[in-house]
Amino acid sequence: MEAITGKALILACSAIGAGLAMIAGIGPGIGQGFAAGKGAEAVGRQPEAQADVVRTMLLGAAVAESTGIYGLVVALILLFANPLLNLL
């Protein structure tokens, strides 16, 4: 049985880490869906407050989406610009 080299181990662990980072996209998706549903309920109950509800909902969706984008950036860095390989 051949020994695993340091580079192969770093690449394997980086691929696993990138997959785990992409799981971070689940949270924003659920949160944005929940916010959109509650926003639709609020507009249905008080149509005159539609502008305020939509503005607040979009701000919350933007903040939630940034979490998913950070996870994507971490995954791309681990896969394509892995800084850990320079430490070998």
Image (cartoon, helix red, strand yellow):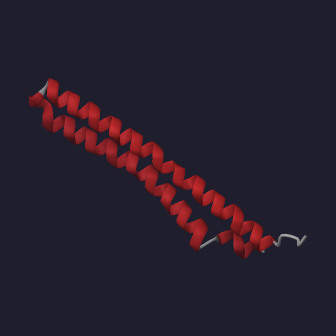
State the image coordinates of residue 32 (x, y, percent, origin top left). Answer: 35, 42
In the rendered image of this protein, does residue 33 appear above or below residue 5? above
Q: Residue furthest top?
A: 45
Name the quarter where the C terminus is drawn.
Answer: bottom right
In the image, is 82 to the left or to the right of 49? Answer: right
Tally the marks. 0
Question: Residue at left 42%, top 45%?
Answer: 28
Q: Nearer the viewer, residue 25 or 62?
A: 25
State the image coordinates of residue 37 (x, y, percent, origin top left). Answer: 28, 34
Question: Residue at left 71%, top 75%?
Answer: 86
Q: Residue furthest front?
A: 1
State the image coordinates of residue 72 (x, y, percent, origin top left). Answer: 49, 59
Residue 40: name its quadrant. top left
Residue 49: name its quadrant. top left
Residue 80: name its quadrant. bottom right
Question: Residue at left 90%, top 70%?
Answer: 1
In the rendered image of this protein, does residue 88 appear above or below residue 50? below
In the rendered image of this protein, does residue 22 appear above or below residue 2? above
State the image coordinates of residue 67 (x, y, percent, origin top left). Answer: 45, 50
Question: Residue at left 28%, top 31%?
Answer: 38
Q: Residue furthest left?
A: 48
In the image, is 72 to the left or to the right of 39? Answer: right
